[in-house]
Image (spheres, rainbow, N blue to C red):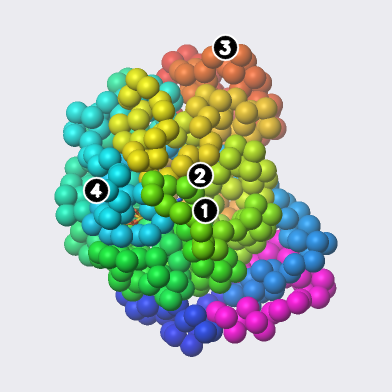
Amino acid sequence: MLFEPQRYRIEDQPHRPFVDPPEIREMLAAAASPTLDRVREVIGRALDRRRLTMQEVAVLLNADRPEAVAEIMEAAHRLKKEVYGDRIVIFAPLYIGNKCVNNCAYCGFRASNRHAVRRTLTDAEIVDEVRALERTGQKRLILVYGEHPLYDAAYIAHTVRTTYATQQGGDQIRRVNINAAPFDVEGFRTIREAGIGTYQIFQETYDPEVYRRYHLGGRKTDYDWRLTAMDRAMEAGIDDVGLGVLFGLGDWRFEVMALVRHTNHLEACYGVGPHTISFPRIRRASDLSLDGLDLIGDDEFVRLVAILRLAVPYTGLILTARETAALRDRLIRYGISQIDAGTRLEIGGYSAAEQEQDLHKEQFELMDGRSLAEVVSELIDSGYIPSFCTACYRKGRTGEHFMEFSTKGFIKRFCTPNALLTFAEYLEDYATPAVWEKGWALIEAEAARTDDPALAERLARIRRGERDILF
Ligand code: SAM
Ligand code: SF4
């Protein structure tokens, strides 16, 4: 059974806060210093594709001995390969505006930062940015906004529509996700009607004490309003939601437990878990000192991703260009299913002639400045299929990660062929001859393995110039 509802001290009810910090701490303490046998037992359940209980997740989080960590990593790698295959979904963020009324101590956009250069794209500038992104081959965007009265639901819906409407032949954005401040149910309805894919918002920290310390002004000081944002989104009919924690604020083990708790809350109340989970780590930002933060090292970060992979196997895991190319390559093995590529954080940065990092114009420091073309080329070299697939969303198959996981043959029937078709389009329209060659070699090897005549026929149609063919 995929959902095994657990009982908690705070019962799950729609629109009601559900995080109970003492309960999470007790679970972590009760699982301290687990034996290797116990760790193996939990790993075994995950590999049997059972959803882990929070007590079991606590066992993995407390498994500090090197051999236990190594087994967790190996299991995460195996599960990822079995569940997702070798696809990596690619997207890019598009910053629409950085005006902000909040004072989040860690963010370059915070209201009190007088050095931040504030800018909101005009409609014409949005079109320029989207065109610039399309010309590189992007098909999936996430639009990002500060929190400001200007960026209300109607405005956000308008920017989503503007993005979809910006097309030139095969160059088109086919899925627009958003990362924006929480709305009421009515606001979420307005946004849903514009056709968004995923609504993403990060709790930043699930520890209310830590939350209070870092959120020093504006609407975002209200922990519960943010915590229940997904409930309102769900009620408004947005059932693709993306959770996240900003790692570096609170204790990482606590935060992972809380992410699983949030997942369980959504499953209990709405029968569907989050579409994705993100785990940004704090980076340098304009006028930000990293002193006093609870920064998390690379090795612990990799463990955290592996544990999440085992804990929520049907949720997509997103790793952004806040991390270096080397760490991103390492983490793809252990569970990442989506990455951004060719990212520019400066507002208007995609269509600007010069590309220079200036922290006062960006939200935080970018660590992976590779272009989309470079990322695609390197993924091919590592045997991964870059996927620009948007099929499930457009065919009305929402909650697709859940289906991938639960429906026998789903990946073989839909995900792999759609990844290959969108990758083929990319190669035909945007790749250099060298990348085209090695990319097609990878497609042919994969297609031969699937041995599906319908796929071969569609790939041939793409070569002849047809576009946007989906399973
Ligand atoms: N303003 C909206 C909000 O706060 O929900 C939109 C999100 S903000 C533009 C995107 C995310 O960036 C935040 O939720 C936060 O997790 C992350 N972020 C903020 N400051 C950061 C920093 N210094 N380093 C890395 N990520 C950061
Ligand atoms: Fe504003 Fe979001 Fe930055 Fe907070 S994280 S200051 S709400 S843009």
Of the two numbered discs 3 and 2 in the rendering, the one whose residue sits closer to the viewer = 2
Marks 3 and 4: CB-CB under 8 Å? no
Return the x and y of residue 132 as percentages of the image width and height. Answer: 35, 24
The answer to whether 67 appears left or right of 202 in the picture is right
Please name the residue that numbered disc 2 is placed on: 322
Q: Residue furthest top?
A: 433
Q: CA distance from mark 3 to mark 4?
A: 42 Å
**Within-10-Å neighbours for mark 1: few <14, some 14–19, many 20+:** some
Q: Secondary structure at mark 4?
A: loop
**Within-10-Å neighbours for mark 2: few <14, some 14–19, many 20+:** many
At a point 65% along the width and 82% down the height, the residue shown is 29
Return the x and y of residue 460 as percentages of the image width and height. Answer: 53, 19
Q: CA distance from mark 3 to mark 1?
A: 36 Å
Q: Report the magenta residues as a range.
A: 24-52
Quadrant for ligand 2 reads bottom left
Please name the residue that numbered disc 1 is placed on: 281
Quarter where residue 16 is shown = bottom left
The answer to whether 427 appears left or right of 179 in the picture is right
Q: As shown in the figure, which amino acid type bears the numbered disc 1? A: Arg
Q: Is mark 2 within 8 Å of ligand 1?
A: yes
- Closer to the chain start, of discs 2 and 1, is 1
**Within-10-Å neighbours for mark 3: few <14, some 14–19, many 20+:** few
- Please name whichever residue, 138 or 427, is drawn nearer the observer in this view of the structure: 138
Please name the residue that numbered disc 3 is placed on: 433
Marks 2 and 1: CB-CB under 8 Å? yes
Return the x and y of residue 38 as percentages of the image width and height. Answer: 78, 75
Residue 383 visible to an observer of this rendering: yes
Q: Is mark 1 within 8 Å of ligand 1?
A: yes
At a point 46% along the width and 42% down the height, the residue shown is 365
Q: Is residue 110 magenta?
A: no
